[in-house]
């Protein structure tokens, strides 16, 4: 059974940093699209960033470019989301997701329907 478990959320002041982790169990992801999504109250879930594990290619939402970085530790089967220069509008529940493989994160890395596996989410709150 594939499980994704996120951790690392919390409350920070504007301008602060957090690092989220997503650890997979029950499967390894040698050529999959691994994504981070977020959902604020009353809003739709939106794609933040994705990484294709086969090539290392990354995709970022315009709103987080230059501030967020996705990375992966193959030995730990873990994907990280480093978030710097956080803003109040980054406040949301953050979810890790993985697809079933072979898609190269295409055609739409930020389409929630493209991902088959989801974590339970971790809350990020940024105060001004």
Image (tube, helix red, strand yellow):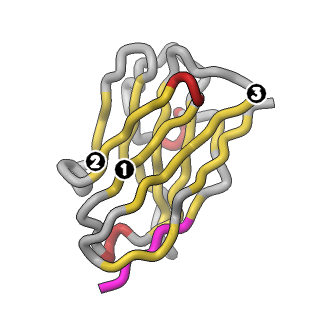
Q: Residue furthest left?
A: 66
Judging depth in this view, the residue of 86 and 100 nearest the camera is 86
Judging depth in this view, the residue of 92 and 113 nearest the camera is 92
Instruction: Check the picture and name the quadrant holding the C terminus.
Output: bottom left
Residue 122 at x, y percent in the picture: 58, 61
Q: Please name the residue that numbered disc 1 is placed on.
A: 82
Kindly state the secondary structure of the residue where label 3 is placed: loop
Q: If you read the primary sequence from the N terminus, does the residue marked by circle 2 or circle 1 appear first?
A: 2
Q: Residue furthest front?
A: 75
Q: Please name the residue that numbered disc 3 is placed on.
A: 26
Q: If you read the primary sequence from the N terminus, does the residue marked by circle 3 or circle 1 appear first?
A: 3
Kindly state the secondary structure of the residue where label 2 is placed: loop
Residue 125 lies within the magenta run:
yes
Find residue 89 and report its image quarter: bottom left
The residue lying at 41 percent from left, 19 percent from top is: 104
In space, the residues marked 3 and 1 are separated at their CA atoms by 24 Å
Q: Main secondary structure of the magenta part?
A: strand
Lateral position of residue 40 relative to residue 1, left or right: left
Observer-side mark, 2 or 1, equals 1
Lateral position of residue 5 relative to residue 70, left or right: right
Lateral position of residue 2 relative to residue 73, left or right: right
Q: Please name the residue that numbered disc 2 is placed on.
A: 61
Q: Is residue 106 shown above or below 128? A: above
The residue lying at 51 percent from left, 70 percent from top is: 10
Observer-side mark, 3 or 1, equals 1
Residue 113 at x, y percent in the picture: 55, 39
Instruction: Check the picture and name the quadrant holding the N terminus.
Output: top right
What span is in magenta?
Answer: 123-128
Q: Is residue 109 shown above or below 38? A: above
Q: Residue furthest bottom?
A: 128
Q: Residues within 10 Å of mark 2 (few under 14, many from 20)?
A: some
The residue lying at 47 percent from left, 68 percent from top is: 124
């Amino acid at each position: 059974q594939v499980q994704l478990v996120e951790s690392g959320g919390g409350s920070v002041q504007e301008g602060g940093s957090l690092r989220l982790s997503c650890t997979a169990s029950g499967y390894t992801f040698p050529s999959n699209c691994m994504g981070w999504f977020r959902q604020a109250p009353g809003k739709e879930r939106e794609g933040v960033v994705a990484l294709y594990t086969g090539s290392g290619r990354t995709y970022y939402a315009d709103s987080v470019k230059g501030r967020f970085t996705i990375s992966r530790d193959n030995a730990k089967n873990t994907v990280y989301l480093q978030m710097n220069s956080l803003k109040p509008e980054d406040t949301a529940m953050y979810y890790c997701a993985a697809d079933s493989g072979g898609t190269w994160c295409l055609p739409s890395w930020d389409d929630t329907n493209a991902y088959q596996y989801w974590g339970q989410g971790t809350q990020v709150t940024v105060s001004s």
